[in-house]
Amino acid sequence: MLFHTERLRLISEIDNPKDTRFCIIGFPFDSTETNTPGQRFGPQSIRDKFLALESKDMTTKIFDAGDIVPVHGNAEKTLQKLTETIDDIFSDSNDIRPIILGGEHSGTLGSVKALKKIYPNLQVISFDAHYDLKDTVEDEKLSHATVMRRIHELKIPVTIVGARTGSEDEIRFSKKINTDLKKIDLKRPIYLSLDIDFFEPSCAPGVGDPETGGFFYENFRSVFELLSKADIVGADIMEVNPMIENNITPSLAARCLLDILEIMDKN
């Protein structure tokens, strides 16, 4: 059980996932980042800020599995560790909801592969400044910038919200996927992925690939409310880079984590 994680500073001291509804898993990996690395330190920075929130009632419902032990420089092996860790969690309870703290966005692929085994009709919603629909980056198929294309290839419906930049190929490919949150099927289970660079850079300066424009927190909350009755079975918050900025961005990520937990806890 949990052969691929190490227990670090915990959000919760609960020792058995059977006793909780949510499982936190850190994904401290940034080896495919081509701009500014440092996302490997994101999980702990989010934990630190989350512990500072008035969220004690919620922490009683969380099992913190610690962080994946990454194979730096090898995305395939690290993603496999994440998938196998979630498989381990599900072996105890199919009802538990995994939440991944990143770490670069490639980790979403590892999570989704595990959840699709439990939820065959899974769909993915990605809040992101980027499409992440490239076919390859520097001749590599596995990258933070290819993750949604790889998920699409698994025959999983993908909705991308907030993308404001992309290559010509990505923009062409985006015609094959949904970009309207109002068109999603709320009866299908949802995996929610939040790339923190979805937000306006003044709200989230600690990211490797900032893009001008984007959402403010209040806008996100109003959009997020559209999912208040959805069946969110897993989620992640990715691309927090505390090596660039270690106050505003992790605090925003922690607040979003609390929002996601509270909405998931209603359903």
Image (cartoon, grey):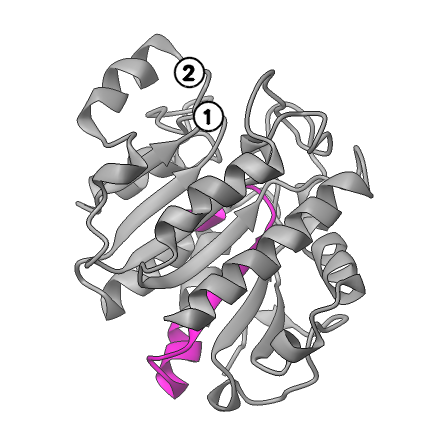
* Residue at image location 59% in from the left, 38% down from the top: 218
Q: Which of 78 and 242 is in front in this view?
A: 242
The C terminus is located in which quarter?
Answer: bottom left
Element on which disc 1 rests: loop
- Snapshot quadrant of residue 214: top right
- Front residue of this view, candidates 254 and 90: 254
Q: From where the camera sits, is residue 78 visible?
A: yes
Find disc 1 in the rendering and name its residue: 130
* Residue at the disc numbered 2: 166
Q: Is residue 105 visible?
A: no
Whether 107 is among the magenta residues is yes
Left or right: residue 246 versus residue 221 is right
Residue pictured at 73% horizontal, 29% vertical: 205
Residue 184, position in %: x, y?
23, 44
Q: Where are the magenta residues, as a range?
A: 87-109
Q: In the rendered structure, which amino acid carries the disc numbered 1?
A: His
Question: Is the residue 159 above or below the residue 14 in the image?
Answer: above
Instruction: Indicate whether 168 appears above or below 52.
Output: above
Say if 193 sits above or below 2 in the image: above
The one nearer the camera, 71 or 221, is 221
State the separation of the CA atoms marked 1 and 2. Answer: 6 Å
